[in-house]
Amino acid sequence: MLKNFFGKLSKGIGVDLGTSNTLVYLKTKGIVINEPSVVAINLRTDQILSVGEEARRMLGKTPQHISAVQPLRNGIISDFEVAEKMMKYFVDKIHKESFSFAPRPRIIIGVPLDITEVERKAVEDVAISAGARAVHLIEQPIATSIGARLPIQEANGSMVVEMGGGKTEIAVISLGGIVSSKSLKIAGEKLDNDIIEYIREKYNILLGPRSAEQAKIKIGSVLPLEKGLRIKIRGRNLLNGLPKEIVIKSDEIRDAIKRSVDSIIIAIKDVIEQTPPEIVADLYQRGMILSGGGAGLRGLDKLIYEETLIPVVIADDSLTTVARGIGIVLEDFDNLKDLLLPSTSDYKKR
């Protein structure tokens, strides 16, 4: 009875634990946190200095006694201790702002398709260490589908392409389960690295990741534009070590990311080829949903349509689709809990 009492007082929390950004959904309130997945730690005192955007601004600029860390790589926890600190920080922040005295929430976390049992256990352990009362995991394409309001529990095929920071997840879903899927370690950060490599080889200039990301966002495109775009970027001249500014064109960004984009298109085609004909027929009629930060890349939806002949719809507010899907599960847990992954531990829902 006491457990049920505290369960009612605690907050239900949904977490889209992404490589680039972490979004937190608070039951009945919606998305309350949308911050970069970066933690700055004072190595002398082992204390958190900042989390999120403020910590992100420290990347590449810290003295020896401060470490700015991204605890996730390709959607998977790579630094357990830092991920635990980040999760606990967010949980404590939510309960502090809502004046709760029983910060032991039910937490639902979105995870990649190809996550192993060991990796799933690591995610659960991080949430438990951060103060969770119960932990549940949901595959990100399922959460994306729910967030996009697709009828995935019906006997109709739905397809989603979730292009995040560390991974691109492609899945066809029917009757609440994944029929065919593919997960690629090619997404936003890989495109940024492609731009860095291209500029280094062509101009002998080394860019920082944030400069490459800004170039991608502001002028990036996967198809030729009617009116080409340009942007000034600054980096370090590798010939003399001094700062240098150049102007690059949208055509150059397209050339830089072409190979990675082609790999994503091939993967989408592979998933369609693995899908039963009856469901493929549904896809041609209903189309597919494009979500995640990569959905904003100019022309990506048109290129996918040209290559697959399946209509492509960009999800509304595509950066928050996973978090909103997890939130819907939180709000209607009893009816949607069958869409969650089985627990890897004895930490069962209470």
Image (spheres, rainbow, N blue to C red):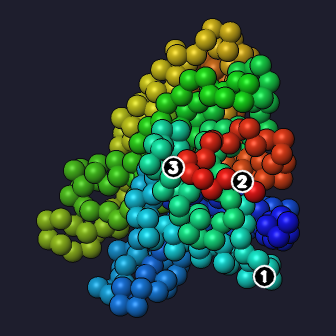
Q: Give the alpha-carbon distance from disc 1 to disc 3, as whole Å.
A: 29 Å
| Residue at 50%, 52% in the rendered image | 121
For mark 1, does the 10 Å Cα neighbourhood hold few (<14), some (14 to 19), or many (20 or more) residues?
Answer: few
The residue at the far bottom in this view is 45
Mark 1 or 3, nearer chain start: 1
- Please, what is the three-letter code of the amino acid marked with disc 2? Lys
Tell me: 23 left or right of 1: left
| Residue at 68%, 78% in the rendered image | 93
Residue for badge 1: 101
| Residue at 22%, 50% in the rendered image | 201
Tell me the SS state at disc 2.
loop
- Please, what is the three-letter code of the amino acid marked with disc 3? Arg
Using the image, tell me which numbered label, if any, was put on residue 120. 3
Tell me the SS state at disc 1.
loop
Q: Nearer the viewer, residue 125 or 276?
A: 125
Using the image, tell me which numbered label, if any, was put on residue 349. 2
Q: Are marks 1 and 2 in contact (CB under 8 Å)?
A: no
Q: Position of residue 158 (x, y in %)?
A: 70, 26
For mark 2, does the 10 Å Cα neighbourhood hold few (<14), some (14 to 19), or many (20 or more) residues?
Answer: few
The residue at the far front in this view is 1
* Residue 254 in view, yes or no: no
- Please, what is the three-letter code of the amino acid marked with disc 1? Phe
